[in-house]
Image: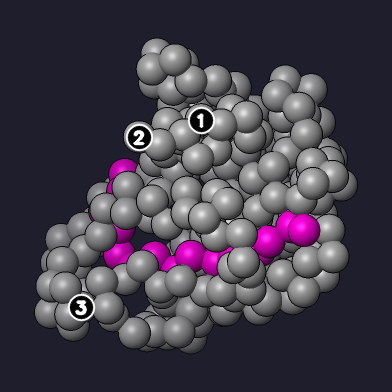
Amino acid sequence: MSKRLEGKVALVTGASKGIGAEIAARLAAEGAAVAVNYSASKEGAERVVAAITGKGGKAVAVRGNLTDANQVKSVVAETVKALGAIDILVNNAGVYAFAPLDGITPEHFHSQFDLNVLGLLLVSQEAARHFNPAGGSIVNISSGASTLAPPNTAVYSATKAAVDAISSVLSKELAPRKIRVNAINPGMIVTEGVVAAGLHEGDMRNWIETTTPLGRVGKAEEIAAAVAFFASDDASYVTGETLHVTGGLR
């Protein structure tokens, strides 16, 4: 694999499993030193780090719950201490829970907005203070749900619509510092979380497969490939974009 990211430092949030783990692996394979952030799954994060270092790459696990501003500061500080100034931030950490309008509670709302939106803003804010002076790239993992707006996802889809908007705003704010900001909106990707929620089979998956032009769900590595592009100099003139990696489902 080409080493497009040789010498770069990347922080990937929520990288102990699923899409985040795949992103961390891909960025490392392209030459970046990667900080693998996790909140609960130390074992998962260490497995991701071991897989990277086993292939001759460089990675460290960095613990921190991103809904807590103090922990966000320590995540960024530990990353910089271990690896140096940040060139790439991938805001992947997120949670989802579905409920019809009648089932929405303040807890349901805050659990998703606190991480998916506030957490993303706090990490972006702190990381931007420690970016390489030459600039770099922020990639926000949004969701096809932000525009598809499926029933029973009012809160989750709203968090991702917020991520789309924040990506546009920050692309303009950070442009003078040569920090590019783009979003990737995945379709249904079969990850441990999706399997655990039982969404990998049944009505939801059938609906996705029958309405997606490419006729299938996606793979985590297909998201990671898009992240690697945005993170690299191949995307040096691309900022403020929202890329749907959904197999054509819009």
Local crowd at mark 2 within 10 Å, few (<14), some, or many (≥20)?
few
Residue 140 in view here:
no
Amino acid type of disc 3?
Thr
Residue under pointer 1? 31
Q: Position of residue 57 (x, y in %)?
A: 48, 20
Disc 1 secondary structure class: loop
- Cα distance, mark 2 to mark 3? 30 Å
- Cα distance, mark 3 to mark 1? 34 Å
Residue under pointer 2? 1
N-terminal of the pair, mark 3 or mark 1, is: 1
Q: What residue range appears in magenta?
A: 178-193
Local crowd at mark 1 within 10 Å, few (<14), some, or many (≥20)?
many
Please identify, in this view, whether the residue under mark 3 or under mark 1 is nearer the observer: 1
Left or right of residue 208, residue 164 in this image: right
Q: Is residue 241 above or below residue 9?
A: below
Inspect the magenta stretch and tell me whether residue 163 lies in it: no
N-terminal of the pair, mark 1 or mark 2, is: 2
Residue located at (25% from left, 71% from top): 247
Disc 3 secondary structure class: loop
Residue located at (32% from left, 47% from top): 221
Inspect the magenta stretch and tell me whether residue 188 lies in it: yes
Whether pointer 1 and pointer 2 mark residues with C-beta atoms closer than 8 Å, the reply is: no
Residue under pointer 3? 212
Residue 228 in view here:
yes
Q: Is residue 153 above or below residue 88?
A: below
Please identify, in this view, whether the residue under mark 2 or under mark 3 is nearer the observer: 2
Please name whichever residue, 154 or 189, is drawn nearer the observer in this view of the structure: 189
